[in-house]
Image (cartoon, rainbow, N blue to C red):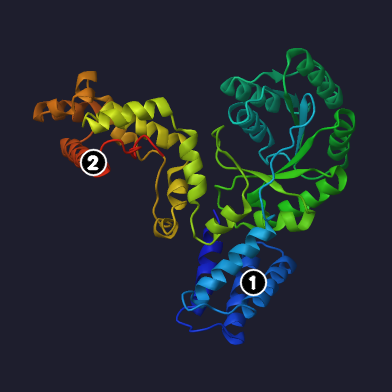
């Protein structure tokens, strides 16, 4: 995401490389390139111009400290302005009302139904709520079925009335049931069209008037760029929605929607959604997104994702095993599982400062760990718990069982031994009573 924009901005900052101080000439040329990069990323020209005018004004008003280069100063100014353009700070959901009613709106294909499932999962697992999903798309039975399947996956009830052709009636009936069943949040997935039309707008407006939602979230496909911004404007004029959700940010998006929507409709971006996994939903943090656009990484989000998979009891058990030099293949496999739950591997690596650019051209598949897992699965339970017993004949059997060459098994075993040695050295350095070891504690 934002790869092209990041690359173009990086090129713009290089114009200041080697410069001893900021002056009107080098600032003008840098700002010009930044504006071009933003426009090429499908950011509206007026928005790009306003942002770069502010960057120029701030840059010319700054005195460069001896420890800060002009290039570093420009990066900070642009980061601050990008963050401000996208809202400045995060905005959480309003969970008022008993139950809280959240209305989901957007065009067909924007990812509304998938987001509804993700939001229900988020509220259930992160906020301790008891949500009810409502299938109010009366035109597409497939959308109702999709929501039912999503509800089953996350163990959240779904309200469906197949014979009812009134979306307003469905919403009202669902809220009545939520009150009876004690559901604290009602998420209403509404119908969409391929383009904005009066019938769709009127129906969503009617649902809004009938149920008085605490939140109206407009879901937009970020890959549609400036078109997404125009659609958001049309929806906002009719619905006065409370927040925006950007979907498909893991696609080949130029970033125009993320950078332009807040400025255009003056409504906060509340969530970003990436991938099909139902836990792939993040609160939108403008400053973190600005850092990622500028290739500065996003360690905070990386740590938060790791903490979400952190099991304190398991970590303590693992620490004891590491201290006793008993770390085995079962432990290793469990750690791999936790890493995979954190999300797309390449996205995770890109959150580490400086790594994103280095791996930009490298294809890192989410299946990268499959070969390792296959080798471990080909071991007997005894072998997994006692790696030292795996001799040459056992390695041949393991290789045959997982469809790998024995040299690959040998290489993996060598890497595992080296990792155990490193853990042992870290253990000695920490000494007794020191907290936390890396594999379990994040």
Name the side, left or right, on which 276 lies relative to 191. Answer: left
Q: Nearer the viewer, residue 257 or 288?
A: 288
Other residues around mark 1 within 10 Å, as few (<14) / some (14–19) / many (≥20): many
In this rendering, would 413 be left or right of 372?
left
Q: Position of residue 339 (x, y in %)?
A: 41, 37
Marking on residue 89: none
Towards the viewer: 240 or 130: 130
Task: State the image quarter where residue 399 is shown.
Answer: top left
Q: Residue at x 58, y 58 (%)?
A: 290
At label 2, counting other C-alpha atoms closer than 10 Å, the crowd grade (few under 14, some 14-19, many 20 or more) is few
Q: Name the spot of residue 273 as percent of width and height, x first.
A: 60, 42
Which residue is tagged 2? Answer: 419
The residue singled out by tag 1 in the image is 35
In this view, the mark in front (2 or 1):
2
Identify the residue shown where x is 56% and y is 36%: 276
The image position of residue 379, as x and y in percent, is 22, 24
């Amino acid at each position: 995401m934002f790869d092209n924009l990041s690359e173009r901005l990086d090129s713009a900052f290089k114009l200041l490389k080697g410069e001893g101080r900021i002056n009107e000439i080098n600032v003008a040329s840098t700002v010009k390139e930044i504006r071009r990069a933003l426009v090429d990323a499908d950011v509206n020209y007026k928005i790009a111009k306003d942002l770069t005018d502010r960057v120029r004004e701030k840059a010319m008003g700054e005195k460069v400290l001896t420890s800060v280069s002009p290039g570093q100063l420009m990066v900070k100014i642009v980061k601050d302005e990008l963050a401000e353009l996208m809202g400045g700070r995060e905005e959480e959901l309003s969970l008022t009302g008993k139950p809280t009613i959240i209305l989901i709106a957007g065009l067909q294909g924007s990812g509304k139904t998938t987001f509804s499932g993700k939001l229900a999962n988020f509220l259930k697992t992160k906020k301790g709520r008891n949500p009810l999903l409502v299938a109010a798309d009366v035109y597409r039975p497939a959308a109702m079925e999709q929501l039912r399947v999503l509800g089953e996956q996350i163990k959240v009830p779904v309200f469906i009335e197949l014979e009812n052709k009134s979306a307003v009636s469905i919403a009202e009936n669902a809220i009545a049931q939520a009150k009876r069943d004690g559901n604290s949040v009602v998420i209403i997935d509404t119908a969409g069209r391929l383009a904005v039309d009066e019938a769709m707008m009127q129906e969503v407006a009617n649902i809004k008037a009938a149920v008085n939602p605490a939140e109206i979230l407009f879901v937009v496909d970020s890959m549609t760029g400036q078109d997404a911004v125009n659609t958001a404007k049309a929806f906002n004029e009719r619905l006065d929605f409370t927040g925006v959700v950007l979907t498909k940010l893991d696609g080949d998006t130029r970033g125009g929607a993320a950078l332009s929507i807040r400025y255009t409709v003056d409504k906060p971006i509340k969530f970003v959604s990436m991938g099909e996994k139902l836990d792939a939903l993040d609160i939108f943090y403008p400053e973190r997104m600005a850092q990622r656009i500028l290739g500065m990484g996003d360690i905070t989000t990386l740590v938060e994702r790791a903490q979400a998979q952190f099991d304190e009891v398991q970590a303590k058990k693992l620490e004891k095993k590491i201290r006793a030099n008993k770390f085995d293949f079962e432990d290793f496999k469990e750690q791999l599982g936790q890493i995979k739950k954190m999300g797309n591997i390449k996205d995770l690596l890109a959150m580490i400062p400086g790594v994103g650019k280095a791996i930009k051209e490298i294809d890192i598949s989410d299946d990268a760990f499959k070969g390792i897992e296959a080798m471990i699965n080909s071991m007997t339970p005894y072998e997994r718990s006692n790696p030292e017993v795996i001799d040459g004949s056992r390695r041949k059997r393991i290789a045959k069982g997982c469809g790998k060459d024995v040299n690959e098994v040998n290489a993996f075993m060598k890497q595992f031994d080296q990792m155990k040695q490193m853990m042992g050295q870290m253990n000695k350095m920490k000494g007794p009573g020191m907290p936390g070891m890396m594999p379990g504690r994040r």
